[in-house]
Image (cartoon, coloured by chain):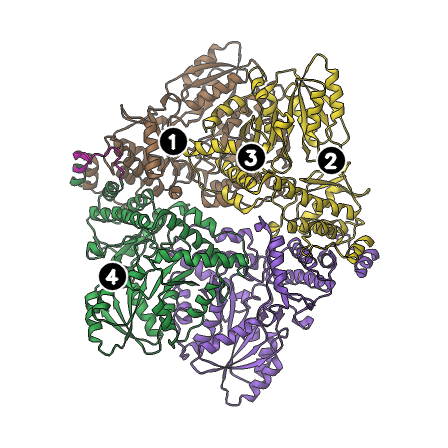
Chain colours: A green, B brown, C yellow, D purple
Amino acid sequence: MHDQNPVFLPGPTNIPERLRQAMSGPSRDHRSPAFARSLVQLLADIKPVFGTEAGEVAVFTASGTGGWETAITNTLSPGDRVLAARHGMFSQRWIDLCERLGLEVQVIDAPWGEGVPAEAFREALAADRERRIRAVLAVHNETATGVTSDIGAVRAALDAADHPALLFVDGVSSIGALPFHMDAWGVDVAVAGSQKGFMLSTGLAIVAVSPRARAAMETARLPRCYFDLRSMLAAGRDGSYPYTPAVPLLDGLRESVHMLLAEGLEQVHARHRHIANGVRRAVAAWGLELCARRPALYSDTVTAIVVPRDFDARALVNHASEAYGVSYGIGLGAVAERVFRIGHLGHLTEAMALAGIATAEMAMRDLGYPVVLGSGVAAAQHAYQVRARGTPEPAEAVAAMEVR
Amino acid sequence: MHDQNPVFLPGPTNIPERLRQAMSGPSRDHRSPAFARSLVQLLADIKPVFGTEAGEVAVFTASGTGGWETAITNTLSPGDRVLAARHGMFSQRWIDLCERLGLEVQVIDAPWGEGVPAEAFREALAADRERRIRAVLAVHNETATGVTSDIGAVRAALDAADHPALLFVDGVSSIGALPFHMDAWGVDVAVAGSQKGFMLSTGLAIVAVSPRARAAMETARLPRCYFDLRSMLAAGRDGSYPYTPAVPLLDGLRESVHMLLAEGLEQVHARHRHIANGVRRAVAAWGLELCARRPALYSDTVTAIVVPRDFDARALVNHASEAYGVSYGIGLGAVAERVFRIGHLGHLTEAMALAGIATAEMAMRDLGYPVVLGSGVAAAQHAYQVRARGTPEPAEAVAAMEVR
Amino acid sequence: MHDQNPVFLPGPTNIPERLRQAMSGPSRDHRSPAFARSLVQLLADIKPVFGTEAGEVAVFTASGTGGWETAITNTLSPGDRVLAARHGMFSQRWIDLCERLGLEVQVIDAPWGEGVPAEAFREALAADRERRIRAVLAVHNETATGVTSDIGAVRAALDAADHPALLFVDGVSSIGALPFHMDAWGVDVAVAGSQKGFMLSTGLAIVAVSPRARAAMETARLPRCYFDLRSMLAAGRDGSYPYTPAVPLLDGLRESVHMLLAEGLEQVHARHRHIANGVRRAVAAWGLELCARRPALYSDTVTAIVVPRDFDARALVNHASEAYGVSYGIGLGAVAERVFRIGHLGHLTEAMALAGIATAEMAMRDLGYPVVLGSGVAAAQHAYQVRARGTPEPAEAVAAMEVR
Amino acid sequence: MHDQNPVFLPGPTNIPERLRQAMSGPSRDHRSPAFARSLVQLLADIKPVFGTEAGEVAVFTASGTGGWETAITNTLSPGDRVLAARHGMFSQRWIDLCERLGLEVQVIDAPWGEGVPAEAFREALAADRERRIRAVLAVHNETATGVTSDIGAVRAALDAADHPALLFVDGVSSIGALPFHMDAWGVDVAVAGSQKGFMLSTGLAIVAVSPRARAAMETARLPRCYFDLRSMLAAGRDGSYPYTPAVPLLDGLRESVHMLLAEGLEQVHARHRHIANGVRRAVAAWGLELCARRPALYSDTVTAIVVPRDFDARALVNHASEAYGVSYGIGLGAVAERVFRIGHLGHLTEAMALAGIATAEMAMRDLGYPVVLGSGVAAAQHAYQVRARGTPEPAEAVAAMEVR
């Protein structure tokens, strides 16, 4: 009976009714002229969401991991060196992927909870006199730690070193929700996923490719076929696919992009910040720490929360699910027992966010966490309140907050 | 973008996905043997929800008001006298319906917020030496005031006066959510609606009829056709309808009854009490009063809350809808400006209820109500908490509650 | 597994996906300003579908029968005389309804398969010197016999007799599919249903009321409450309802009216004629007769087909359902064993119609009917063909048709 | 308005309502124990559909092409030789995929319309004294030509040559619809797709792997990551995924497998044969040829039809879509202009098939094809008829068929 509860996963998100309907139409012919026209239009319409005019977009039937593989296999050759930081589950997995595909990965370790170490990147790039590094990998939003990194700083590091390496960015849990400026940041391949900012089911890896990356495709020698960008981009220009596409998801993506552009990307980003801000205030009121180490790193799509010593974050997530039917993100990898996550990307309302905060409080108290019931909710309410009368909050309300 | 928020209307409720799917199948033949079999089964399966074995059930395509008209026009004749209490919008409307249909209504006024005045009924029935009163009307759950009346006491009043009048009960916002014992209470016609305890869309008036009421149908002279029970009951026995039925709603009703019986009616009722209890604790924490005058009257399906002097309840409901996209029930009739309502019937979870409480707090604060943010939420959380560790709440948490 | 087959019922029709989606949104507040605005707009938008500017529209939660009762009880008084023809199941039922409601019905019998006998009406009206006839009842499209009557001729009969009686028209299976000119025909109350031309589920009786009928409401003394037009029209002007409305169906109706107006009513009517024409050609090719006696009476929404002597139409309908999972309309009333019906109203395509014709052929052959497989299909194909090359059909094809 | 028409694509198929609903539930946690349990069960339940007990199943978020890549990259090493036939679009594409991935492909060309040349395979395998051929590729059902090959004969060829090569079978458009005996045929990797026999949307590549293939995974050196079977199989045993899975499609797959097993696989296969038989009879009645060269090769999931000389099959498909809103499969590759295809896999009913046949007739006639309207329909009806009375068709009906 809990299927009416919102989920607080960092993707898949809660799917707005309009998108559920868009994804559930009857089968139609993916080889018809009508489909071709709509695909060409869709591929053009997505570009502003990535912040690109020069880039081209391809949409693969795959999860975000398939998007990473696309970036790597289409632009690099066996034995090529890439530079990457390891500071969370998804950056670690991308490194693992590169290694499996036969690349040499120059790894810079950073604490989980830190962002991409742009300064260390700058040094590594400067030290790379022979220009052996062919590509730099950066995870824009580390979903495992709730950390958003400064991709502009990574670009600056490349520029400072005057290094020609390509720049690949994992924007799976950021694009469509956080500001993303592919052209301005000089990103060569950016990867997004349907189940995050686009609010759809999992199943599409959305990849944007710069002119430089397209040029690199001509000489790259890693084998690829399913994820071959040349075939996919060429087909996309005609509105076709190299193989049977996932039409319902593409229909959903079209509608999703319409929603994002109609709302306005700046407003979409501001809305995510607004909701995230309330969640973070709640965490502060609970007296808990974020996994992200500094406010500059706080993610507006997912908040990873460190549980107090002696508690097990996985037990918390399981308890919330079993006792209240509410799903939060478990901790992953190095922080599996120490962190639980509240996903707040996609079309989350204040009311939904408050439900998630309130239920988390109950679940924590049930397990003996030293949090005060209602304290996080109140803090979030202060952030969410419209304050129609325009006056600052009266003193006694704030006072009540203080004593908690 | 607020269509993902739950609604807190006292009906229509939030519709569980399973029931939305049940109501959205393709068209099928309402004159087929398969439909007939399923209708006969459905009419039998509903009976325990009304607490009846002796009764027969008919399902009209109409709102609950159509169910009232069914009760009246099938059993009474022009000029007949009925006894009714006026203590809320729906009891008042039922009286109005009787008057429009040409009956003489002996009205006993009671304050809005009171229940059916069983003692006054007893006196009126005892005084009716000539047995002119042909029927007694009682609203089990006054949706306007959040009051649940004691129907057993009404039956006792009839018995004490040894009065042969029929007993008609409006169970629109109770049946399927609150305990209802048609046979044990000697109810002759009970009326329910699809959009309340049955968690469906509006469109079905579900009427259960006792053997005595069926006998009265033979002599009743009020004109009726659409709501003619004899035609409907006769058709229903064959699994047919006197006119085109609303098949998707009937499909939904079948699924809804399956859900209720599978969960167990006692558990369904306990679940409503559990959720309602949290809402009432929140109201107490806000320092506000219920419209219902005593705990014995508190409804487990809807809570009507009196706003502080100088505030307008309608403005609150409008503000919550516009600012936060959350719908509460407005005040109706005599208490229109003084009361807003939180509906909590149907498949509401703790998380959903907390969203409603938290949003109400923000809306009230926005308008200057002297409530403390988070205070109602905390009180509800105390009621909803599972307390997995089995210990009573530690003192400091309770203390924090007290000072609010 | 047959739920993907179209149905060939004369309502409910196959529901287009767009309307299924429109009817399946989450619950929303029927007392909100947004709902009020959309209802006011909807009631205005429907008017052209009825062919009225002077009329006002009310939408009741009920089947079409409730619409009849609305027409009668709001405009007439006990004992009033109405003039009606009995020439099919639905005209008979309307007469029955009037009698149950205490009216005196002057019945003119006509054969089932004939239309409304306008000439007999003219005589009856002329003979009514005392003007005791208060209303004339006409069924625009007799769903039981597949007969569309000439309502303009009924108006002419009234005018010829210079008779002030009101004119009530059952347009349940015509409005939204066949031309309907309420104002031009001087119709006083016209009744439609959601599950026919509007392509929705059953559940809405849509009633348009002329100024004269509204005036009659002031003095009519038949009791009514649920179907009280004064309450409903007054509420509708404010965008509200006297009782809980069936919001999903109203959402569907809004979308349906958008579809009808966007396609253009003339095109909608032409499309129905086109599809119906193919079905009629198929029947001719089978060598079977229509229940409707003359081409002028042929209905473009339903075709009632007389089975050959010694066959039982009900067995045919059952067999088609059980063997092929395809639903046709059974015969009703006086023609129950003699007639089966192919409903073709709503959004039926040529491909769907051909499926219905082809399956009917198989079912008939299975039962030994002397029809040639493919013969009806071929005749319908001739009617449906686009003939892209612009030339008349080559002789040999026609010849092949002839020999069948 | 044509979205109610069935499609006659050789996948995606028409999606039964039950599966559309299964795929449209709200988001849920793919890391929960409940999801894990259901995934483990699903992976076990699929096995009989592949005809395997010894095999293990993995489900990738990808189209069928991803399944091919999975088979190749997990079992082979750069430069390995594979043996494959080229006799249709999909066999050709698989060869292309192998070449892109750096394999040496020994191609045996066969006419499009022929099956896998088992005898030629036997010769090639026997000639391969050094056992350089590491794998044999076979397309069970060539969707482009409507040809089903005899996989048992391919196995016999391997056995006759006593050759240790692995056997990979593309069952994308056969598994779930045609008999498939993975274990009996000694298939090492079999590939299916969600949008064919499983009647879902595109998006899942379903791969079954024999113990021998699993052993080969340990030494294979082609790079792979997204399609890494070891990771996927290991995760699947725990009910988890190496990356975010497409939960709604998996929910649909669970329901689909339930439907297939509940109906019984033999009955599913018989049903496909029954529907296909009618389509083939229609083609014969039109006087057209199949692309498949012999009855033994006829596919029960798709029929590829050769258009008469001087006609363009693509124009036919476009015309049917534009004029009648009905989608057929276009010709592909070498037979693009010469062939159009009627897909008849999945949950197609007789009524739906007849709609497709009838519409194809109209479209062909419109373009001047020498076919007689109704002729193909009649032939299919003869195949589909239930013949309830148990007698053979009367002579005159057959006669009428003959003269066409």
C-alpha distance separating marks 1 and 4: 49 Å
C-alpha distance separating marks 2 and 4: 76 Å
* Labels 1 and 2 in the same subunit: no
Q: Residue furthest front?
A: C390
Q: Which residues are magenta?
A: A385-398
Q: Amino acid at mark 2?
A: Leu
Q: Nearer the viewer, mark 1 or mark 2?
A: 2
Name the residue beneath numbered marker 2. Answer: C297
Instruction: State the residue in front, C61 or D308.
Output: D308
Q: Are marks 3 and 1 in contact (CB under 8 Å)?
A: no
Give the percent coordinates (x, y) of residue B19. Answer: 49, 43
- Which corner quadrant of the image does residue B366 belong to? top left
Name the residue beneath numbered marker 1. Answer: B329
Name the residue beneath numbered marker 3. Answer: C203
Q: Secondary structure at mark 1?
A: loop
Q: Amino acid at mark 3?
A: Gly
Q: Secondary structure at mark 4?
A: helix
C-alpha distance separating marks 3 and 1: 25 Å
Q: Is residue B58 left or right of residue C367?
A: left
Instruction: Report the chain holding disc 2.
Output: C
Name the residue beneath numbered marker 4. Answer: A152
Q: Is residue A165 left or right of residue C56?
A: left
Q: Amino acid at mark 1?
A: Gly
C-alpha distance separating marks 3 and 4: 59 Å
The reply to whether the magenta stretch includes residue D278 is no
Instruction: State the residue in front, D382 or D87.
Output: D87
Q: Secondary structure at mark 3?
A: loop
